[in-house]
Amino acid sequence: MTESRSVAVMARARRSWTAQAAGVWSLVFAAAGGYWAAGGAGFPFGAGDPRAVQVGSLFAAAEPGSTGLAIAALGLLGAAVALVMTRSAGARLPLVFAWAMSVGLVVAVPDVRVVQNFGYLFTGYTGLWDGPLLFMLFCIGGGALWAATAWTYQGGSTREPVRWGTPVTYAAAVLALPYGISRISWALGIPLGVPPGFLSGGNTTGAWVVESVLGGLCFVGAILTLGLVQRWGEVFPRWIPGLRGRRVPIWLAVVPGLCAAAMLIQAGARLYLWLAKGDIVLTAESWGSFGPGLSWLPWGLTLAAAIYAYYLRRRAE
């Protein structure tokens, strides 16, 4: 009886903490919207985002006045819902709102810039950082808080380990390869999927490094994905000093994996939107420019599923 009461108290504490954090974030979100609605500088959408159309922003036509008011209203509503979620559990409407906020903030607001700048970060290039990107990162953080709030509010997952975890993990690892293969080919001077002259303008050491890094990240991602179903994804290998033989914390695989899945889904969804609108045309000579990127969306979805399966299996253990 005492043990179950302690578990209930801990669950309420987690729910309260995450809901409070989501509420504070929502108030900051509301304040930013009110500031822009009043004519404040730094509006991250529409005219305030010169790259909006280029990177597939869904808010390229947004106006500061109306959009700012909408952000302010949504933030205030979020703060109110978060307050309700600190004092109750299991109500359906707050839960639906929390998950909707999470998906909207993590998937709808960010665009290709997030995964683009993540890749360039490994080359040391930060020339494409801008105000809209920072706002996207702020929204992703808020989305993560709302997801944590929804997860703890509903009591986490009560499911047993699933059988489809291994095949979906292998599928995610395979889907990581198309983009990586194309980039490594370009780094080696092989015009895979592009006209022969496509690489001549970028035949420099810097371009070689960028293509190698972007392609290499995909292969590293594929290897790490396989770790979700390998022993070394659960116990640190012997060659890691200080950690050998210790259990890998679940969060160490789940948190980075979900971040990667979110970036892939964000960018991949934009590519399919461009394809549907006719902004992308794949031909026999130029399919390499965008074609390999079409694997991002299924890669992100299967990766998210693989991480969920990993979480269920590790938690059961």
Image (spheres, rainbow, N blue to C red):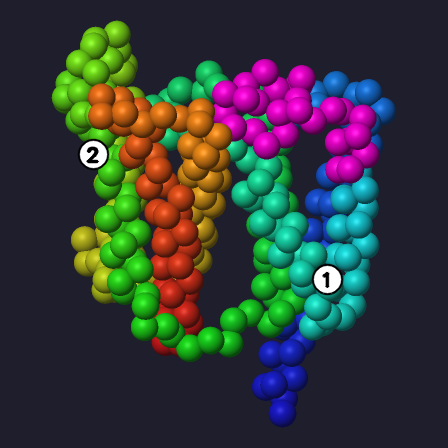
Question: Which one is in front, 203 or 291?
Answer: 291
Whether residue 216 is visible here, answered yes or no, is no
Estimate the x, y position of residue 126 in percent, counting from the top left.
45, 20
Q: Quadrant of residue 282?
A: top left
Question: Gap between marks 1 and 2, in whole Å?
Answer: 44 Å
Estimate the x, y position of residue 128 in percent, counting from the top left.
48, 19
Whether residue 53 is visible here, answered yes or no, is yes
Q: Mark 2, residues whose alpha carbon is within 10 Å: few (<14), some, or many (≥20)?
A: some
* 225 versus 203 height, above or below: below
Image side of residue 211 versus residue 161, left or right: left
In the rendered structure, which segment of residues is drawn in magenta? 46-71
Residue at x-position 46% and y-position 40%:
269
Q: Is residue 183 magenta?
A: no
Q: Mark 1, residues whose alpha carbon is within 10 Å: few (<14), some, or many (≥20)?
A: many
* 120 versus 257 height, above or below: above
Identify the mark at residue 94; answer none if there is no mark. 1
Image side of residue 134 versus residue 224, left or right: right
Image side of residue 39 versus residue 44, left or right: right
Q: Quadrant of residue 305?
A: bottom left
Quarter of the C terminus within the rendering: bottom left
* 198 versus 6 height, above or below: above
- Given the image, on which type of amino acid does mark 1 rest? Pro
Q: Earlier in the sequence, mark 1 or mark 2?
A: 1
**Outermost top residue:** 201
**Outermost bottom residue:** 1
Q: Secondary structure at mark 1?
A: helix
Residue at x-position 27% and y-position 25%:
283
Residue under label 2: 181
